[in-house]
Image: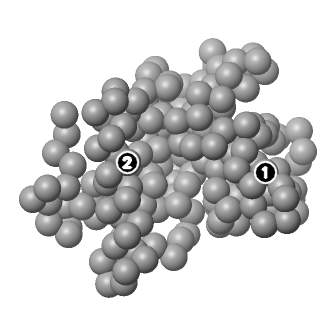
Amino acid sequence: MERVYEGMSLREVTEYLFCRDMPQKSDLIFVFGGPEPARAQKAAELFHAGFAPRILVTGGGMVPGGQTEASFLRQILLDAGVPQEAILCENRSINTRENLLFGRKALEEKGLLSGLRTVILVSVPPHMRRAWLGFHNAFPNVQAVCCPSDGEIAADSWYQNHDGQHAVFRELEKIRSGLLKGEL
């Protein structure tokens, strides 16, 4: 099992959690559920730059206003000019593992699973390692490219405030738990 945070320096924690790749031509943009509009904005930017022909938004959690996370993110994509036919929506998942499992099922039902070779993962910056680990568990033969959205919790400053520290150590705990359970 990977060493997850005991004895890790701030630099090692940062390098471990905050995964970031250069975008590359992919088959799909996979947006993990959450209430931050920046996720959908990043996906729209990648879509308009021609990195992938479709976007899957996930998330059944509710955001203010009574919408699911996926419906909320879908509307941001539509407002940003992403065509409706390029957006797939998974509205039942309530955590990262379900985002992946229900997202996989949605892709399978649309006949898109077998054609996946490379997928761009979009979430908030400190979530990217867990997203990447979970993705490889759920999609073992598909390459993942990490392209986090902008976020309040950034790699260069997370340790300077309580909210950043809390979010990072919470992610490390979730990764440790997921590894112990065999979910990551």
Q: Check disc 2 and give the amino acid type.
A: Lys
User: Residue 41, can we see it?
Assistant: no
Q: Which amino acid does label 1 sit on?
A: Thr
Quarter the C terminus occupies = top left
Q: Name the residue under label 2.
A: 174
Question: Considering only order in the chain, which callout, 1 or 2, is on the residue closer to the N terminus?
Answer: 1
What numbered label is drawn on residue 11?
Answer: none
Q: Measuring from the top left, give residue 27's x and y in whole percent.
A: 64, 33
User: Residue 58's spot in the image, x, y percent?
Assistant: 69, 43
In percent of the image, x 63 and y 26: which residue is there?
A: 104
| Depth order, front residue of 157/25 | 157
Give the residue drawn at x 41%, y 45%.
Answer: 130
The residue wearing badge 1 is 68
Q: Do the residues labelled 2 and 1 touch (CB within 8 Å)?
A: no
Mark 2, other Cα within 10 Å: few <14 / some 14–19 / many ≥20: some
Front in this rendered view, residue 149 or 3: 3
> Which residue is at the front of the view, 118 or 92?
92
* Image quadrant assignment for residue 101: top right
Q: Is mark 2 on a helix, strand or loop?
A: helix
Across and down, in percent, residue 111 comes to: 75, 16
Task: Measure the C-alpha gap from mark 2 to mark 1.
Answer: 23 Å
User: For the residue carrying disc 1, how many other residues have a C-alpha within 10 Å: few (<14), some (14-19), or many (20+)?
Assistant: many
The residue located at (56%, 63%) in the rendering is: 149
Q: Position of residue 76 (x, y in %)?
A: 81, 61
Question: Quick one: quadrant of the N terminus?
Answer: top left
Q: In the displayed structure, does residue 141 sit left or right of residue 155?
A: right
Work out whether 14 lies above or below 26: below
Residue 176 in view, yes or no: yes
